[in-house]
Amino acid sequence: MKNKIFSYPILIIIIIFPLWGCGIDKTDENRTKGEKKSTYIIKLKIGLIPEQNVLNQKKRYKPLGKYIEEKTGIKIKFTILPRYGNIIDNFNRLNLDGAFWGSFTGAMAIKKLGIEHIARPVNIDGTSSYRGYIFVLKKSSVKSVKDMKNKVIAFVDRATTAGYVFPIAYFKEQGIKNIKSYFKESYFTGSHDAAIHAVLDGHADIGCAKNTIFNILQKKDKRIEKDLRIVATSPDVPSNGLGLKKDLDPKIKKALKDVLISMDKDPEGARVLNKFFVIKFIETSEKDYKPVFDMAKKAGINLKYYKYINK
């Protein structure tokens, strides 16, 4: 009787240990067509910032998540946050394991959460960065910052580089110290595509957004190239990359990094990248965020203590 009782814990350990050990490997490597997939041992919750309409964002990231799952056996659950600032506020509350951070939220995540960035995409044009645009209608009388006085400006969110930090730094360099008194009205659209359409549709005289979303929408809406004019461009900042919490298992981090940066060498991965509007992923780290740190300083923003309520 004594021997039977003692054997149960050993049996449990023997059963569980092999399952955990294979958690970052592809669990259905030898699965034949039509056979049901194995259960995923590891599940990660990854946050997404609302750079586009929520439905478009889900559609864009779904194939990428599925590819990661197929190659690593790690189940990916994407959580789209309703606004940029929430990705910092809710990271611990929602028990997120990582996120595809924007350049500014990524810089804040380094300072506030100790996030480790592992990979970021290379755009169709061969760049692994993006720029902020300040733009107006071509028919607008606005030619310079002086012409913007008493106009309506549409920002994206206080926690975005292209949609807020760059414009604020730019206007301060141009001698504008009080944004609220300089413009007739300033407001936040919540996404880059909404800021672009705010100017196109006449709801704002001036808009701010990132060039990658500008370029994606330009392929779908001819009005963007035809009717909009860019009046200022920011320095390059890193593209939205995957950053993971500091205490996540290093083996899991390595598995995710390896599958992302090798995607372009796999025909299936190349097809997924095409749907994601990029050509590959490359390794990234904290040093790539220096332009963001510099821009925040020019804008008078302390990343560690920054409050980003959109009022």
Image (cartoon, rainbow, N blue to C red):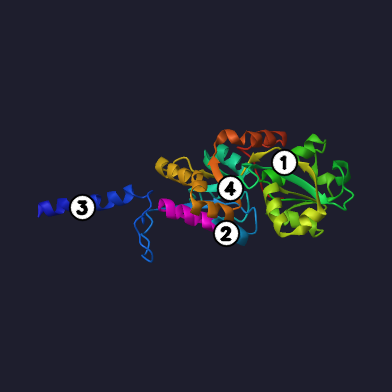
Mark 3 neighbour class, 10 Å CA radius: few under 14, some 14 to 19, many 20 or more: few
For label 3, the residue is 11
The residue tagged 1 is 166
Front-most of 158 and 124?
A: 124
**Image location of residue 91, percent across then percent down:** 53, 48
The answer to which of marks 2 and 3 sits earlier in the sequence is 3
Residue 78 included in the magenta stretch of the image: yes
Q: Amino acid at mark 1?
A: Phe
**Mark 2 and mark 1: Cα distance apart in space:** 27 Å
Residue at point 70%, 42% (across, down) = 165
Mark nearer the viewer, 1 or 4: 4
Q: Is residue 149 visible?
A: no
Above or below residue 216? Residue 285 is above
Query: At numbered mark 4, what does the secondary structure look like: helix, strand or loop?
Result: strand
User: Between tags 2 and 4, which lies in front?
Assistant: 4
The part of the image, by quadrant, that contains residue 55 is bottom right
Q: From which residue to which does the magenta span run?
A: 62-79
In the displayed structure image, the side of residue 104 where residue 153 appears, left or right? right
**Secondary structure category for the residue under label 2:** helix
Q: Which residue extends farthest bottom?
A: 34
Residue 100: percent from left, percent from top: 56, 48
Which residue is labeled 2 in the image? 58
Residue ID for mark 4 = 279
